[in-house]
């Protein structure tokens, strides 16, 4: 009898896994808001782990869950897929593929898939026996010391935007804003940029009618078409400074250039030239050098690095929430390390192809000293 | 002998398709190259290529029916329903002026290879119209 139950559980698990893999092939990588209804009432599952799939872009835990009302209808066990953050983020929190074992009894609270399939975005995973936390309800990267430290400088007095001379390396993370909104505008949205109230769309930025229509369309689809996820396109523009996985600024002072390495987006990078070169070349780049990050020329104005960037292509979304841009996008960014642990980022958006006027946004990032820039890959790299 | 008509102008399609960027295009929805048919068009043939651009204020571009380019005189996009309206002045084989009016709507806006379907009309007739972005 027990063997029959075990066999059936295994069969259910295998079927569930097969169904999930079929569904996953259709979804590929995705935005969280696009796949899961994160604003609806949460669902709680209690069951037993049948498999742990520790791979990019997201970790999955499969679990067998007994359905309610089983006494009358007979025992029914369904296999669920619980999706978690990327391996990189979970590993930063000290987890690994052995954190959970097959057979462990767990309780999961999270958001159900929008298509009502048996998939859950796991926001709180606990061992059922003692309710101790397995995975955190919300990942928080290491915070910095609260005591203010002076801005580090190079011997010539210029601020160091990355690793300070003689100090440990690190990267910038924990952006105070995770979606682009014009300065001075307050609208409620989730961390992925989905508006709490769709009627707020026109407030976000001064969009032309077509751009507002595109933005509303993307919002209505919960950002599920975001090419950063669907097609693994680089998250160019200001978006690269709104990732929780952070950015690392590496200053090559001898050759007068700054590399901006991303903790997300397949480790894409951007180069800011400070050698006075002209921003010339084919608009949007070409197949050999598609300009997801444009052509950037920087110069120092006092303690602030000012970067002028043009020639973006139109193949990506330059913000998390789905604001559109065109090839006319001209970006002026200002990087100011206001103290050792704070980077103020300001950006002016000049895109007459999509907006009715220039507009600006700003936020801060925090220094994660001694930490290695986390890797995150759109497609699996951990077979 | 419909096949010969296709063969006749297919090199032009391939040549144009080869030089035009096959980009995802997440910007202005009409921008790019489109290939399709305006069916029942005896004046210019059924097969067409449209190339449209956006300068931030107006749409410009051409309709290529396999012969001479027809300059788009006016094109508008209404986000309410993603309605497209195009007007263009051409000449028939005898050199007489004809004016095309095309009305349609974008389908699958989220896709790089989105469509525009609708109707065309001129003094010489009218028919259905369907193009897909390349």
Image: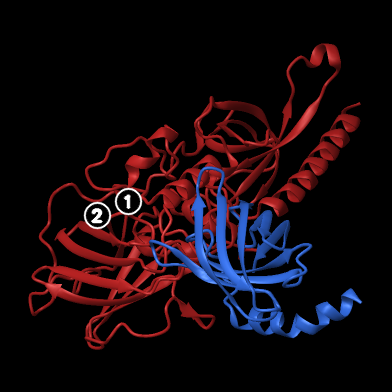
State left or right for residue A332 relative to residue A280: left
Check residue A256 in the rendering and tell me which mark sits there, or answer none: none
Chain painted in red in the figure: A
Marked residue nearer the N-terminal end (2 or 1) = 1
Q: Position of residue A154 (x, y in %)?
A: 13, 76
Q: Secondary structure at mark 1?
A: loop
Instruction: Look at the image and tell me in which quarter the N terminus of chain A lies.
Output: top right
Quadrant the C terminus of chain A occupies: bottom right
- Of all chains, the one bearing label 2 is A
Q: How many marks?
A: 2
Q: Disc 2 to disc 1, how far (Cα)?
A: 20 Å
Left or right: where A168 falls relative to A126 = left
Mark 1 neighbour density, 10 Å: few (under 14) some (14–19) many (20 or more): many
Q: Position of residue A232 (x, y in %)?
A: 56, 63
Label 2 or label 1, whichever lies nearer to me, is 2
Asked whether residue A47 is in view, the answer is: yes
Classify 10 Å Cα crowding around label 2: few (below 14), some (14-19), many (20 and above).
Answer: some
Residue pointed to by mark 2: A360
Where residue A315 appears, x then y in whole percent? 51, 66
Residue A235 lies, in percent from the top left, at: 45, 62
User: Do the residues at pointers 2 and 1 share their chain?
Assistant: yes
Residue A174 circle label = 1
In the rendered structure, the answer to whether residue A253 lies left or right of residue B118 reads: left
Place residue B16 in its image quadrant.
bottom right
The colour applied to the residues of chain B in this rendering is blue
Asked which secondary structure carries label 2, the reply is: strand
Q: Quadrant of residue A377?
A: bottom right
Does A351 appear above or below A46?
Answer: below
In-front residue for pair A369/A239: A239
Along the viewing direction, whichever of A155 and B67 lies nearer the viewer = B67
| Residue pictured at 73% horizontal, 65% vertical | B37
């Amino acid at each position: 009898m027990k063997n029959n139950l075990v066999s059936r559980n295994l069969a259910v698990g295998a079927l569930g896994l097969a169904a999930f893999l079929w569904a996953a092939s259709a979804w590929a990588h995705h935005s969280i808001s696009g796949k899961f209804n994160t604003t609806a009432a949460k669902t709680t599952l209690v069951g037993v782990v049948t498999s742990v799939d520790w791979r990019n872009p997201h970790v999955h835990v499969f679990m067998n869950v007994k359905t309610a009302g089983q006494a009358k209808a007979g025992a029914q066990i369904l296999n669920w897929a619980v999706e978690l953050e990327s391996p990189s983020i979970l590993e930063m929190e000290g987890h690994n593929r052995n954190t959970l074992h097959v057979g462990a009894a767990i309780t999961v609270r999270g958001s159900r898939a929008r298509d009502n399939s048996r998939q859950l975005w796991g926001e709180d995973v606990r061992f059922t026996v003692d309710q101790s936390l397995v995975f955190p309800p919300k990942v928080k990267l290491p915070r910095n010391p609260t005591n203010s430290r002076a801005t580090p400088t190079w011997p010539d007095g210029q601020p160091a935007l990355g690793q300070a001379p003689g100090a440990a390396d690190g990267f910038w993370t924990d952006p105070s804003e995770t979606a682009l909104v014009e300065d001075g505008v307050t609208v409620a949205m989730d961390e992925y940029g989905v508006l709490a109230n769709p009627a707020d769309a026109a407030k976000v930025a001064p969009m032309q009618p077509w751009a507002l229509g595109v933005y509303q369309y993307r919002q209505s689809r919960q950002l599920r078409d975001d090419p950063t996820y669907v097609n693994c396109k680089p998250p160019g523009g200001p978006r690269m400074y709104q990732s929780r996985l952070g950015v690392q600024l590496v200053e090559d002072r001898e050759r007068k250039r700054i590399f901006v390495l991303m903790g997300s987006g397949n480790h894409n990078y951007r180069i800011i030239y400070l050698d006075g070169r002209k921003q010339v070349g084919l608009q949007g780049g070409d197949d050999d050098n598609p300009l997801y990050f444009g052509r950037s020329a920087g110069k120092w104005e006092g303690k602030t690095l000012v970067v002028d960037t043009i020639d973006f292509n139109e193949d990506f979304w330059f913000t998390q929430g789905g604001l559109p841009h065109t090839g006319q996008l001209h970006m002026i960014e200002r990087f100011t390390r206001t103290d050792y642990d704070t980077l103020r980022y300001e950006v002016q958006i000049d895109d007459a192809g999509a907006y009715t006027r220039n507009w600006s946004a700003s936020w801060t990032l925090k220094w994660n000293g001694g930490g290695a820039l986390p890797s995150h890959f759109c497609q699996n790299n951990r077979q | 002998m419909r096949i010969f008509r296709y063969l006749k102008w297919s090199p032009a399609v391939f040549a144009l398709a080869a030089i035009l960027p096959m980009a995802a295009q997440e910007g202005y929805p009409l921008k790019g190259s489109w290939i399709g048919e305006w069916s029942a068009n005896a004046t210019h043939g059924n097969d067409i290529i449209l190339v449209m651009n956006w300068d931030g204020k107006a749409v410009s571009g051409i309709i290529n029916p396999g012969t001479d380019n027809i300059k788009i005189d006016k094109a508008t996009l209404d986000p309410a329903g993603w309605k497209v309206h195009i007007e263009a002045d051409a000449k028939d084989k005898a050199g007489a002026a004809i004016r095309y009016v095309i009305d349609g709507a974008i389908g699958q806006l989220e896709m790089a290879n989105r469509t525009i379907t609708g109707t065309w009309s001129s003094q010489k007739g009218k028919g259905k119209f369907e193009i897909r972005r390349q």
